[in-house]
Image: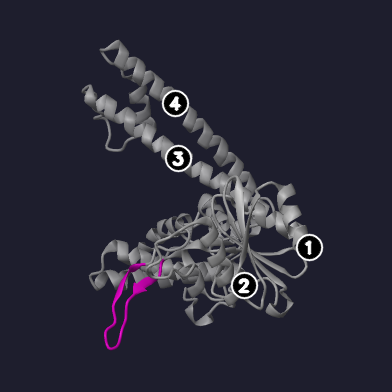
Amino acid sequence: MPDGISLAPADVRMFVSLDMHKLSIVAATLPPTGGQPKVERIETTEKAIRRFIDRLGGGEGLAVCYEAGPGGFALWRLLTSMGVACDVVAPSLIPVRAGDRVKTDRRDAKKLVTLYRAGLLRFVRPPTPETEGLRDLLRCRDDIRCARTAARHRVGKQLLRHGHVFREGKKSWTAKHQAWVRRQRLADPLAHEALVQMLIHLDGLDRQLAALDAKLEQLAGDEPWGWQVAKLRAFRGIGTLTALGLIAEVGDFARFGHPRELASWLGITPSEYSSGEQQHRGHITRAGNHHARRLLIEAAWHYRHAPRRPSSGAQPSDRAWQAQIRLFHRHRHLTAQGKRSTVVTVAVARELAGFLWAELTDQPPREDKLAA
């Protein structure tokens, strides 16, 4: 996560902050010498934005920032194509003054440009259009998966209300259970019609998921993500969808200079409140990207099993095998100390993030850890 503005401070002739909304933008400008920010309101159209930049004397020497939000990165891409140095601010890391109870668009724009000039803002890394498209597709799949789970629950609960209980197995939504569901006939015709409609909806969701999975399998083998997917899939607990999800959410792993930065961005580092002689560490921060955090923690659950090389097929890479050994012993050690399984898994996920970072940034493996 970059900390400095896109231009060197000596090259900036004007600082600009944009408080962007759906139909309007409140812009505040402040010269490097300081003073009182000037504020004006413009439309969100490309024509209005270009005209505003021209009024400021063109893009050369301008340092522009705006908060990341529902508007995405379209404004950043437009300004960048115009030759304007633009930074996207991380909203959760903007300093907040205690006791400030007045919030308006003008005040927000003035505050943002003042902090921008002072160098007190932190910025996010905008994804490439291809990575953002992959992220949208994977999040769409996750939404459909959640909708299918909810639809399955509705079907099961309706059958239960009418006294239809599956007794031919212990697991739901296996092939045997689904065949049983479709054989059920409810006595009340209206209730049965509701069941039929819910099953039609469920079938549609199943077909959508199957189509998306086929598309994602194809993308996983093509450029530009094929080599990253292959490296990530060598690790236990990471399949094609998890690998693509991590690539889409994290982006370029090399933008993190150390695995601790990646763990902090994922929100899997412990919170801390220490003062004087007292030290206290609490729950994980849960900051950053919750999609990537969920995928990583789900993968970490697999390391409770002993290391094992597959009898056939692709073998794990040296670092993936090192991760199996290290993380299994880490899981067993923390469990023996009486830690809860959820706490242990998050600790394992934190170390797994370091292994993945090292693999995708081509760090040299530690030869002393490559035990057979």
Q: Secondary structure at mark 3?
A: helix
Amino acid, disc 2: Asp
Q: Is residue 273 magenta?
A: yes
Residue 145's disc number: 3
Which-is-in-front pick, marks 2 and 4? 4
Mark 2 closeness class: few <14, some 14–19, many ≥20 residues within 10 Å:
few
Q: Quick one: 280 or 205, which is closer to the camera?
A: 280
Residue pointed to by mark 2? 362
N-term-proximal mark, 1 vs 2:
1
Question: Disc 2 versus disc 4: distance between alpha carbons?
Answer: 46 Å
Bounds of the magenta span?
268-284
Question: Disc 1 versus disc 4: distance between alpha carbons?
Answer: 54 Å
In-image side of 59 versus 267 (left or right): right
In-image side of 279 versus 29 (left or right): left
Residue pointed to by mark 4? 201
Vertical position of residue 279 compared to residue 201: above or below: below
Q: Quick one: 173 or 176, which is closer to the camera?
A: 173
Residue 58's disc number: 1
**Location of residue 304 in the rendering, given as x and y in whole percent from the top left corner:** 35, 63
N-term-proximal mark, 4 vs 3:
3
Confirm or deny contact between disc 3 and disc 2 (CB under 8 A): no
Mark 1 closeness class: few <14, some 14–19, many ≥20 residues within 10 Å:
some
N-term-proximal mark, 1 vs 4:
1
**Residue under the image location 25 percent in, 71 percent down:** 336
Q: Secondary structure at mark 2?
A: loop
Q: Which quadrant holds residue 217? A: top right
Which-is-in-front pick, marks 1 and 4? 1
Amino acid, disc 4: His
Q: Secondary structure at mark 1?
A: loop
Amino acid, disc 3: Arg
Q: Secondary structure at mark 4?
A: helix
Question: Disc 1 versus disc 3: distance between alpha carbons?
Answer: 47 Å
